[in-house]
Image: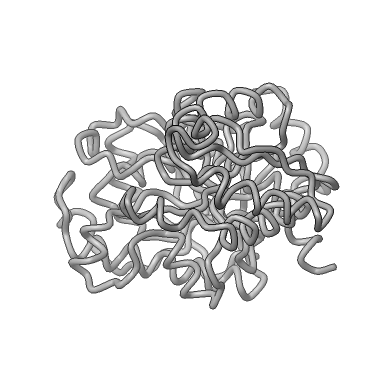
Amino acid sequence: MAGEFPRWRKNPDIRMNRSLIGIPLGDIAGVGPEIVVKALADPALYATARPLVIGTGSALRRALRCTGLDLKLHPVSDPAAGHYRPGSIDLIDLDNIDAEQVIFGQVQAEAGRAAFEFINRAVELAQAGQLDALATTPINKEAFRAAGVPDIGHTELLGRLTGSTDPLTMFQVFELKVFFLSRHVSLAQAIGLVTRERVLDYLRRSAAALQTLGIARPRLAVAGLNPHGGEHGLFGDEEGRELAPAIAAARALGLEVSGPIAADSVFHLALNGTFDAVLSLYHDQGHIATKMVDFQRTIAVTLGLPFIRSSVDHGTAFDLAGTGRANALSMAEAIRLAALYAPLYGKSRAA
């Protein structure tokens, strides 16, 4: 960890080539500010990224008190003015909420409003080409609703703000990558979305997304929906009626797709290198698979936006807010992954 920091300090070109990652601060009633300051306290992070927080200075100062960290805030009005060096936190300070008036661990409309404004400003900067990628912190859906924000989550909000239709969600933990056919819908609704047309569309888009991340010929697998993949119709017929025709159509288009493969084995196979990614058919199917590998290192990536976005895959953790005990590993991994993928994604979309 300590070995990489002096290398870029001695070579300014390395410093300037690091991806500039915007970090909107999220719901400040939760652990977002604390995991951000903890992540940015690691000098090694600056070897690969130039992190810029978009939030409010009062929340960061409170987080520094909670965690006992000695970092300086460096407010800037323009990303180009950042120092991006260990020991200080570069910040675009919207000064739109007084964190001292926000109660830790409670749903508050003002916190939801501020979180929306942090994200909105980060998107504006990314779309203007002033940020290479975003690494987001947790928001609270109830606080969003209380603030009148119509979006159910980050992905939907980012899609609306950028005019992107149905962005793709990909989870990554180590080399395991998982795409999701559906996200925040009931299980009954998710089953209804398992159609050959939708599966084929997601296979095409998932393959294209993997190509933007540097995998020239992706090997995809489709998870089964029913126990044992339906056992040829004994436990459900979606595999034969919807999934198999979609996979055949994808192969006819030249895509390398396998399945449907029973969900109790397909993720293990992908983790061990048989496939580059798995298409999960509903929210919890893929969430459980990735988080059981390593909860803290499971990172959400949103593709199909004008820029790449990574995120921690945990919530606001209201029970830990203000204690200084929240684990920042996921935040640090999200920043690193955004910095890794930003050059590949930007180059691909510019082509």
Closer-to-camera residue (105/219)? 219
In percent of width and height, residue 24 lies at 44, 58
Residue 68 visible at all? yes
Instruction: Identify the image quadrant of residue 125.
Output: bottom right
**Residue in the picture at 60% in, 66% down:** 305
- Left or right, residue 106 beside residue 112: left
The quarter of the image holding the C terminus is bottom right
104 is higher (above) or lower (below) than 265: below
**Residue in the picture at 73% in, 27% down:** 274
**Residue in the picture at 54% in, 34% down:** 232
In percent of width and height, residue 5 lies at 69, 32
Closer-to-camera residue (188/280)? 188
Instruction: Identify the image quadrant of residue 69.
Output: top left
Closer-to-camera residue (329/230)? 230
The quarter of the image holding the N terminus is top right
- Left or right, residue 118 beside residue 186: right
Q: How many marks?
A: 0
In percent of width and height, residue 300 lies at 52, 45
- Left or right, residue 338 beside residue 213: left
In percent of width and height, residue 114 lies at 30, 65
104 is higher (above) or lower (below) than 276: below
Residue 45 visible at all? no
**Residue in the picture at 48% in, 40% down:** 225
